[in-house]
């Protein structure tokens, strides 16, 4: 479903992604781990072109993300086609990024109503269903600032799901949360995974990654260290760098 | 001091003040409309990452902030007709002049307001498939506007006060009417005092409204 080939990303002269190759299959739960600054989040943001990349290919369902191919060179894709692609990929952010001037329900309805132009009544029913799914029915009319971090992040997940995306991208969804609120967010993600959603998860929650992932990718300094099943990565990693990293984070 | 106040004279000529206030309100309305719409445009241009939009907007803004309003007004009233043959009425000149002037300040208010919104809001808007326009109009501006209100009201109040410059271009706004009245009555103390109070009465409710709005939005977001 997602194919990444020789992906390179620069911030000015800083070379943050240095040739990433990976395929992510439909229905797969794919976790990305690694030390901070290893390029995990940048990698994730390249998948829906929130970050531009300079070399290599990101393909979603066979279509090149962010660029159009013409003879001999590639040009940036039109804004419309980039936006259309993003509606098929939900994204959940470390800092939630809920629209603070809109209620919880309005946050969830915004995409389907305004971008996908679905009828408001129909969207409202679906949004309330989604809020029930993440356990926040009673918060529908509240503003985000009245919610705890864990509740805000569950709204963030509902907002992304409201677009009925084919894949969900999670950018360190629990890193900004107080420890006691991490569980409620992971529970929602776990039920999504069980439901067969394709998920790419950048995370520091090792036990969660181990439990829900089909495969885990270890990154360091902009390259892939190894990709394997969680039993291998967390049980007997092939690379010394992975073992080192896990020894430092899992104590 | 044994000056004998005769505020009765102001009451006798109250219609002159009302007429002047009407013109003052009209000048404020026109120049605000011009200032806000051009200001929004220049503010967006200056926030843009497209150089051919950003650069001219920056030049405009800095030029109008760096020159005195009074000079801008007399230039429009006296020099523009010589150059272009376009002679506007006093009211039009003041409205356009103050409008162009205010646009520079409103543009900065819009730009700063837009810049103050967390980048994550753009990310979230883009991630649900919004383009620049929708994200700006539905997500960024509504939040930015709340932060713009205090400086906006400030600029609006300044604009009301600046309309008194219209007296220089023979526009019958409050100050000009007051000056005429003084020529007829020789009562500058009373008339200027009432004039100052009249402006305070016009402007204070606006400041009050902005404080109310700020408080309302603080509790409802």
Image: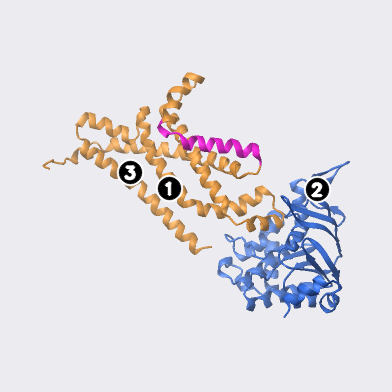
Chain colours: A blue, B orange
Residue A8: image tag? none
Residue B52 is covered by the magenta coloring: yes
Place of residue B167 in the rendered image (x, y in percent of width and height, measured from the top left): 35, 31
Q: Between tags 1 and 2, which lies in front?
A: 2
Q: What secondary structure characterizes most of the magenta part?
A: helix
Q: Between tags 1 and 3, which lies in front?
A: 1
Residue B154: image tag? 1
Residue B69 is covered by the magenta coloring: yes
- For mark 2, what is the residue? A67
Distance from disc 1 to disc 3, alpha carbons, whole Å, reads 14 Å
**Lateral position of residue A76 relative to residue B156, left or right:** right
- Mark 2: few/some/many CA within 10 Å (<14, 14-19, 20+): some
Q: Nearer the viewer, residue A105 or B200?
A: B200
The answer to whether residue A72 is visible is yes
**Lateral position of residue A15 relative to residue A180, left or right:** right
Whether tag 1 and tag 3 are in contact, CB under 8 A, the answer is: no
Whether tag 1 and tag 2 are in contact, CB under 8 A, the answer is: no
Distance from disc 3 to disc 2, alpha carbons, whole Å, reads 58 Å
- For mark 3, what is the residue? B199
Q: Quadrant of the N terminus of chain B?
A: top left
The span shown in magenta is B50-70
Q: Between tags 3 and 2, which lies in front?
A: 2
Label 1 is found on which chain of the structure?
A: B
Label 3 is found on which chain of the structure?
A: B
Place of residue A251 in the rendered image (x, y in percent of width and height, measured from the top left): 72, 80
């Amino acid at each position: 479903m997602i194919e990444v080939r020789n992906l390179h990303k620069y911030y000015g002269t800083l070379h943050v992604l240095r040739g990433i190759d990976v395929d992510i299959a439909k229905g797969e739960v794919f976790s990305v781990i690694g030390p901070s600054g290893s390029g995990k989040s940048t990698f994730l943001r390249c998948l829906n072109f929130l970050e531009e990349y300079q070399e290599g290919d990101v393909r979603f369902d066979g279509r090149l993300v962010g660029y159009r191919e013409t003879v001999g060179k590639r040009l940036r894709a039109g804004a419309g086609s980039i936006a259309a692609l993003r509606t098929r990929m939900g994204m959940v952010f470390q800092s939630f990024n809920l629209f603070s001037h809109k209620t919880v329900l309005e946050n969830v309805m915004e995409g389907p109503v305004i971008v996908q132009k679905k009828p408001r009544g129909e969207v409202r029913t679906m949004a309330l269903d989604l809020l029930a799914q993440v356990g926040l029915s009673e918060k529908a009319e509240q503003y985000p600032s009245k919610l705890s971090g864990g509740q805000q992040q569950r709204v963030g997940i509902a907002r992304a799901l409201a677009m009925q995306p084919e894949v969900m991208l999670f950018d360190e969804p629990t890193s900004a949360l107080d420890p006691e609120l991490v569980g409620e967010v992971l529970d929602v993600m776990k039920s999504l995974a069980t439901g067969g959603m394709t998920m790419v998860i950048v995370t520091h929650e090792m036990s969660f990654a181990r439990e829900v992932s089909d495969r885990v990718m270890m990154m360091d300094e902009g390259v892939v260290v190894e990709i394997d099943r969680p039993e291998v990565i967390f049980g007997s990693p092939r690379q010394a760098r992975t073992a080192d990293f896990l020894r430092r984070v899992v104590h | 001091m044994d000056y004998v106040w005769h505020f009765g004279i102001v009451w006798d000529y109250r219609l002159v003040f009302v007429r002047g206030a009407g013109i003052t309100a009209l000048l404020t309305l026109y120049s605000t409309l011009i200032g806000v719409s051009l200001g929004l445009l220049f503010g967006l241009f200056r926030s843009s990452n497209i150089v051919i939009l950003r650069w001219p907007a920056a030049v405009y803004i800095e030029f109008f902030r760096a020159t005195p309003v009074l000079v801008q007004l007399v230039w429009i009233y006296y020099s523009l007709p010589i150059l272009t043959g376009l002679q506007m009425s006093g009211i039009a000149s003041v409205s356009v002049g103050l409008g162009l002037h205010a646009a520079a300040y409103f543009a900065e208010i819009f730009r700063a307001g837009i810049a103050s919104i967390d980048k994550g809001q753009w990310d979230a808007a883009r991630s649900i498939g919004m383009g620049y326009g929708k994200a700006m109009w539905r997500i960024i501006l509504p939040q930015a506007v709340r932060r713009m209100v205090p400086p906006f009201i400030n600029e609006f109040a300044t604009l009301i006060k600046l309309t008194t410059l219209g007296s220089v271009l023979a526009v019958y706004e409050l100050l000009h009417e007051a000056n005429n009245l003084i020529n007829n009555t020789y009562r500058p103390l009373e008339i200027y005092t009432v004039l100052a109070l009249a402006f305070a009465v016009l402007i204070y409710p606006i400041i009050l409204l902005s404080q109310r709005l700020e408080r309302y939005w603080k509790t409802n977001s």
